[in-house]
Structure formats: C-alpha cells, structure tokens
Image (cartoon, rainbow, N blue to C red):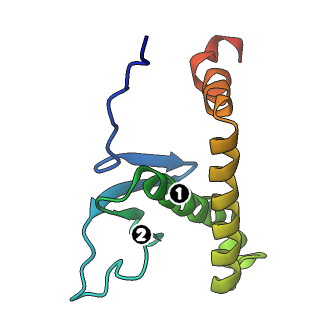
Amino acid sequence: MSKKKEPSISLDGKKVSLNFIEVDITVCKPDFANDNMTDCYGQYHRRKNLIEIQKNLSNLDETNTIIHELMHLIAYASGEVTAGALKDDSDEERVVNSFANLLIILFRQNSWLIDYLKTKLIDNDQNT
C-alpha cells in the first residue's frame, strides 16, 4: 500500500506572527534590474515585515530558505540584532545560516521529530 501524498502548501501569501511582529511571505522571481534576490534564495526585510522567497526552488532549498529567513526574524525579535551579540551583520548571517542548516539536517535525519513537535505544540492544546 502506497502512502498518500499530501497536497503541497504554498508559502505565497502566508503570514507568520512572532510576538508583536506579523510578517508577510511572498514567493517571487529574482529581479535583476533592481538587484533583488539575484544572489540569494530569500530575504527578510524587517522594516517591511516581509519575507521574500525565490520562486521554483526545490523542496529542500525552499524549506532551508524559509527556516533561514525565520531565524533572522527570531534573531531580530530577540533583540540580539539591534543591541546584542548579533548586531554585526556578518555575525547575524553566520549564526542564522549555521542554525538553519543544522535544523534542516536535524529534521531530515529525525523525520519523526516534526510530527512529535506538532502533536505536542498544536494538536494537543487541551493538555496545556
């Protein structure tokens, strides 16, 4: 018996919220005239409350990119970007990149973990 494939969920038009910050997500093509996403797969614009993800990425690249950009959001919301340990842009990018890549590896090597976390955090609200 084959496992039923779940329908793909698009990021385009979704929103994520973290504390006081609500961020729109858009999927778009690179714009070479404006030098927008011509050297990256995604970007977090904290002043616009926007995450842009490049269109037509592989599942792995799209997942890694959204995790990476969400890590930038988390770093900003923590205060570490504006006045803390990540106030240097190169430090922020290095830490975010390392953490995002390692999270992807962790979830790929332990696929049960996502379902477990979802069950404990979302599906089982009556036990909180």
Specify which label sits upstream in the sequence, 1 or 2: 2
Looking at the image, residue 11 lies above or below residue 28: above
Going by the numbered disc 2, the residue's amino acid type is Tyr
Furthest-right residue in view? Answer: 85
Looking at the image, residue 41 lies above or below residue 112: below
Whole-percent x, y for residue 66 in the image:
48, 56
User: Which label number is shown at residue 64?
Assistant: 1
Looking at the image, residue 120 lies above or below residue 48: above
Whole-percent x, y for residue 58 in the image:
39, 55
Looking at the image, residue 74 lies above or below residue 89: above
Classify residue 32 by image quadrant.
Answer: bottom left
For mark 2, what is the residue?
41
Whole-percent x, y for residue 17 in the image:
49, 47
Assign a secondary structure to mark 1.
helix
Q: Is residue 30 left or right of residue 50?
A: left
Q: Which quadrant, please, contains the C terminus?
A: top right
Write the residue at 63% across / 59% down.
100
Q: Is residue 35 left or right of residue 109?
A: left
Q: Is residue 104 left or right of residue 62?
A: right
Check if mark 1's residue and mark 2's residue have beta carbons within 8 Å.
yes
Whole-percent x, y for residue 35 in the image:
31, 87
Counting the numbered discs, the total is: 2
